[in-house]
């Protein structure tokens, strides 16, 4: 083991657009939790070549905190991340939050538009950005982790739970991590990253480029603080109100058909009627859908 001895014992692994920024802020304010300062280390998928010491260096100041971890929402869908996490720490506690997959994909698309990374229609974005659909294959991704970790090490919640009662959602996370309950202030119970339009597409694109540059040049802590700043985000983006875009109903129905098998399998994986909550049919998807989960795509 490298010189740094503090090994993280928890990680939020996904999915994206399911309250990860909100959770980061809730955990960052807890006195018994040490959280890597940069939301999105992405070591176990994107930066694994940096080596374990690079990763562990992010936790050098953890001391004797009761819970030490990070938030990287792409780990859940990564084919390699689970085994790499298990190799570093087989006792790692894993936090997961799932969002209805079509709603999640569309929110991810809106985020691309908001950040000036894409300006085309949703249907075309599905072709250009495969992650929009792949990250919604929850049963498949969860099973990969369940093959590596005991079920007791995975805390799987739903974005619906966060929306319904943020404090209760946080309480369950705190209990899972073995830290005391913390009453969150009213401001911290609100959404942190609402969808919206860039006030200036050029400025938003420039801000995104600056953020990537800061990441490459080692200014990760500053980058994280700026990205999470409500003042900065309000200056760059105008939140949607009544003008929030919606998914074409025919396309939504097609996508839901493609996700049906994954959602139905979640019921047994989680022991919870997720398919009923999300309004999916109880009938199994046709066999052809398993090999071609999204007809025409």
Image (cartoon, rainbow, N blue to C red):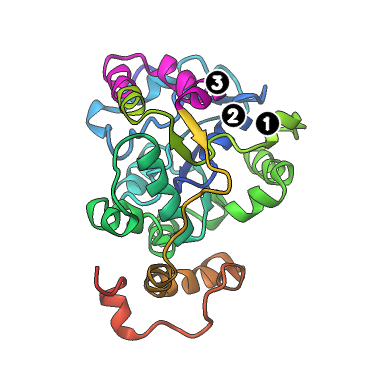
Which range of residues does the magenta coloring cover?
209-236
Of label 1 and label 2, which has the lower sequence position?
A: 2
The residue beneath circle 3 is 231
Q: Is residue 1 left or right of residue 274?
A: left
User: Element type at marker 3?
Assistant: helix
Name the disc covering residue 25, or none.
Answer: 2
Label 3 – label 2 distance at C-alpha: 15 Å
Magenta includes 220?
A: yes
State the image coordinates of residue 169 (x, y, percent, origin top left): 68, 46
Of label 1 and label 3, which has the lower sequence position?
A: 1
The image quarter containing residue 106 is bottom left
- Please name the residue shown 37% across and 34% down the image: 115
Front residue (pair 217, 116): 116
User: Element type at marker 1?
Assistant: helix
Query: How many numbered circles does the render carry?
Result: 3
The image quarter containing residue 86 is top left
Name the disc covering residue 188, or none.
Answer: 1
**Disc 1 to disc 2: CB gap under 8 Å:** yes
Front residue (pair 4, 175): 175
- Please name the residue shown 53% across and 19% down the image: 62
């Amino acid at each position: 083991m490298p010189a740094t001895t503090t090994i993280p014992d928890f990680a939020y692994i996904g999915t994206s657009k399911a309250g990860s920024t909100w959770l980061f802020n809730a955990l960052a304010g807890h006195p018994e939790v040490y959280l890597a300062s940069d939301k999105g280390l992405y070591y176990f998928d994107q930066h694994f070549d940096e080596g374990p010491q690079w990763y562990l260096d992010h936790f050098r100041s953890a001391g004797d905190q009761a819970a030490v971890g990070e938030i990287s929402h792409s780990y859940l869908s990564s084919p390699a991340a689970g085994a790499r996490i298990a190799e570093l720490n087989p006792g790692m506690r894993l936090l997961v939050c799932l969002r209805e997959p079509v709603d999640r994909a569309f929110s991810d698309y809106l985020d691309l538009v908001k950040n000036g990374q894409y300006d085309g229609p949703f249907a075309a974005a599905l072709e250009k950005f495969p992650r929009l659909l792949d990250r919604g294959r929850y049963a498949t991704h969860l099973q990969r982790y369940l093959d590596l970790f005991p079920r007791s090490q995975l805390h799987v919640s739903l974005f619906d739970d966060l929306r319904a009662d943020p404090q209760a959602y946080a309480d369950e996370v705190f209990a899972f991590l073995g830290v005391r309950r913390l009453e969150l202030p009213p401001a911290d119970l609100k959404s942190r990253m609402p969808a919206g339009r860039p006030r200036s597409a050029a400025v938003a694109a420039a801000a995104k480029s600056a953020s990537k540059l800061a990441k490459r040049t080692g200014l990760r802590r500053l980058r994280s603080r700026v990205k999470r700043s409500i003042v900065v985000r309000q200056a760059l983006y105008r939140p949607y109100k009544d003008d929030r875009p919606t998914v074409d109903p025919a396309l939504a129905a097609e996508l839901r058909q493609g996700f049906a098998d994954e959602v139905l399998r979640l019921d047994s994986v989680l022991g919870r009627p997720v398919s009923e909550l999300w309004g999916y049919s109880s009938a199994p998807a046709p066999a052809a859908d398993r090999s071609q989960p999204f007809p025409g795509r």
